[in-house]
Image (spheres, helix red, strand yellow):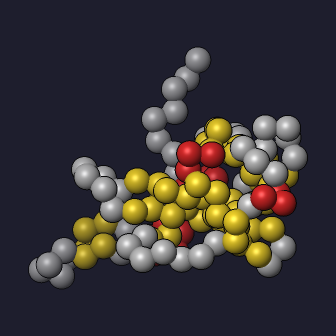
Amino acid sequence: MTNITELYLSSVLNKTVINEAGATLGKLWDLVIAPAEPLPVVTQILLKSGKIIYSVPWDRVLLFNQVVVSASGIKGNLAVYAPQAGTSLLKRDVLDKQIVDVNGAKVVR
């Protein structure tokens, strides 16, 4: 069996998120991260269903890999996403952005 040690955000975006019964909750829209030491942590996953974006706390995520994204609960009990101070969205704020060091040299994209 192969262990996956890396997971690219682009490989899971727009993946259908299901619950433990196999019912569709929505499509993975983004991940919410918060500052922590030594690295930021994922605090929520955001799901899009129709035009509404829902938030699922990370502690309700059952599986998160390139094949399956699953969370506990039912669609009717999902909270509508409300931005929180001190958090960032990975897709919106980090994906495909260039990080520049203080001297102006490109470090990584």
Q: Nearer the viewer, residue 71 or 11?
A: 71
4 left or right, relative to 102:
right
Residue situated furthest top in the rendering? 1
The residue nearer to you, when weighing 33 against 95, is: 33
Name the foreground residue: 90 vs 102. 90
Q: Is residue 100 left or right of residue 53?
A: left
Image quadrant occupied by the N terminus: top right
Q: Is residue 48 above or below residue 42?
A: below
- For the C terminus, the image quarter is bottom left
Residue 30 position within the rendered picture, expressed as x and y whole percent measured from the top left:
59, 65
Q: Position of residue 18 (x, y in %)?
A: 79, 47
Q: Is 93 drawn above or below residue 12 in the view shown? A: below
How many marks on residues?
0
**Residue at 35% from the left image edge and 57% from the top image edge:** 40
Q: Is residue 90 visible?
A: yes
Residue 6, image x and y in percent?
A: 47, 41
Q: Residue at x 51, y 45 (%)?
A: 7
- Location of residue 24 in the rendering, given as x and y in whole percent from the top left corner: 85, 52
Residue 104 lies in what quarter of the image? bottom left
Residue 95 in view in this figure:
no
> As drawn, which residue projects farthest toward the bottom?
104
Location of residue 66 (image quadrant): top right
Q: Residue at x 70, y 45 (%)?
A: 71
| Residue furthest front as drawn | 77
Residue nearer the viewer, 92 or 106:
92
Q: Residue at x 25, y 76 (%)?
A: 100
- Compared across the picture, whether 17 is left or right of 102 comes to right
